[in-house]
Amino acid sequence: MNDRLTSPETGVGAILARHGVLSPAQLGELRELLKERKGASVLELVVSNKWATEEAVARALAVDCGFEFVGNIDPAQVSLEAATKLPISYAKAHKVLLIASGEEEATIVCGDPLDVAALDHVRALLGVSVRVLVAPAGVVVDAINRVYERQDTMGELKSEEAGEDEDEGDLLDSDDDAPIIRWVNGLFSQAVKERASDIHIEPEEKEVIVRYRVDGELYIARRASRQFMSSVIARVKIMAGLNIAEKRLPQDGRISLKIAGRALDVRVSTVPTSRDHERIVMRLLQKSNTLLDLSDLGFGPREYALMDSLIRRPDGIILVTGPTGSGKSTTLYGCLNRINQPNINILTAEDPVEYEIGGIHQVPVNAKIGLTFASALRAFLRQDPDVIMVGEIRDKETAEIAMHASMTGHLVMSTLHTNDSAGAVTRLVEMDIEPFLVRSTVIGILAQRLVRVLCPHCREPYEATEHELRQLAIDERRSAMRAARKLSARYALPGVDYQPVGWFGPGMPTFYRPKGCEHCDNKGFVGRRGIYELMVMDDAVGALILQNADAMTIKRAALEGGMDTMRDDGARKVLRGMTTVEEVIAATQEDVFVE
């Protein structure tokens, strides 16, 4: 942003106020911020303070400058030959994308029409008149990334055609490593843009396949000739600090990157395969991700209130259960962030530290030097903690120390790998933890899964069938039985509006299914949300734990007391149009039902 135009009469703030984007009060506050933060970007301050959206700002500036506004840019319609006349570093710095270039006129899209110097430089470089379009800054930067990535892709295709005989020696003897570096860097930048959680680099018989896991689903993102595999593996190993000569044993490493100003921690795992090359999987952890509140994660009103009451207890153990990748760590971070106050000492032991939170002291465990969850937890007890978070309870030693910490006046949060909340009780007993210890220390167990969220722009409504209602256990008979339950005191919270999930007619409810559009990359889904099952320790469940009852018996007692299962929570989200029946059925197991 050209910030020399910041005077009260002609500045950017004044332009935005003149077009109704900023109120007089916001304009005054903006001027005060500019005095405090010398050199700060006006547009970034306006957007970051949520006074206006990037689109509203771009529209106002376009009108004021007399340029045409465009809401989006289709990278496929941009001339790659024209775009690459500007270096990508210059294009990103000035948020300028050259989309067409002719003998008499060129067309550019910019995010800041007041950056007159950049527009003049483009005119001087091209030597023709320039037609200027204005788009939101984020849209311009995203289009720049997508367009310039096509340059690398075209180079890969040419290399594949030139090397069809797949002579690996030629590639290894080549001194030109830049294409490989750009290609690997492109994998990370594209993965971040597409919100991928994992990158898989896999050798096949004649090619290299790259797959991204987005919203829990794997899909093929890139292909390249097999002749590149050795160089790609070597590049990733160098970045991760691994031994590039060792190809017979699995190796683990880490990469720290910064992409578009965001810190990225990458966990790298390599394993040898029968195809003469190693297979690489990389888990992406964006440390700078904004932490979500529990309500943003998908908690309903009652579960939100119950969880909020549990995390404010002075002592006890709260367990979050589910398989790998079900969002357990994100839930725990949301809990910690909610109670993070200067008067509370919070310590965590994690493997690895996924989010860095100010005010919380986080310890990455390292088994190679003896810093395990158990040893970290033991050390925490000498650090005067109020709240302790342990990444995972994996063994009896860690479980015993956690329970000792709970009994000595500390709130402990951790995770377990079990299918449901009742299964966590039997899992602890299987670790040789005495049932009376479980009963006296565990105050709540949250089981969770993730389901994909339907794209709100293209989801298709349809009339539900009787079979789907039975699958979700919200047919009329079971809905009536659920509504007739008498909630125990632990589940009946005063002032919290709770309605048992169900459908009582008339007719059939409206469900939704995915379709696909430009907003969701034709996937039909955007992001994921949790479905939850929160079992609070009450007298009925506690008595069964002391009797060493099985998980199904414990779950049945919790249901009688008022617990909703994960499928119940999923059904509620299906009725709201958030997800599909198929997503909920795939994520949950058949629940016991209290007759």
Image (cartoon, rainbow, N blue to C red):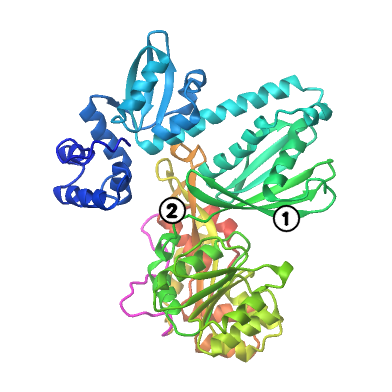
Which element type, helix, strand or loop, lies under badge 1? strand
Mark 2 Cα-neighbour bin, 10 Å: few <14, some 14–19, many ≥20 = many
Image position of 360 with respect to 527: above or below? below
Residue 180 appears in the figure: yes
Residue furthest to the top in view is: 103
Q: Amino acid at mark 1?
A: Asp
Name the spot of residue 213 as percent of width and height, x first: 60, 47
Vertical placement of residue 522 versus 474, above or below:
above
Callout count: 2
Q: Position of residue 312 (x, y in %)?
A: 42, 79
Q: What amino acid is at disc 2?
A: Met
Reading the image, the residue beneath label 1 is: 252
Q: Is residue 235 above or below residue 282?
A: above
- Residue at numbered disc 2: 578
Q: Is residue 300 left or right of residue 469?
A: left
Coordinates of residue 469 in the picture (x, y in percent): 49, 59
Q: Helix, strand or loop at disc 2?
A: loop
- The answer to if 552 sits in the magenta stretch is no
Q: Is residue 505 in the magenta section?
A: yes
Q: Residue at x 32, y 44 (%)?
A: 39
- Classed neighbour count for the residue bearing mark 1: other residues with Cα under 10 Å, few (<14), some (14–19), many (≥20): some
Q: Main secondary structure of the magenta part?
A: loop
Please provide the residue range marked out in magenta.
489-510
Mark 2, mark 1: which one is toward the viewer? 1
Q: CA distance from mark 2 to mark 1?
A: 38 Å
- Mark 1 or mark 2, which is nearer the start of the sequence? 1
Q: Position of residue 544 (x, y in %)?
A: 59, 88
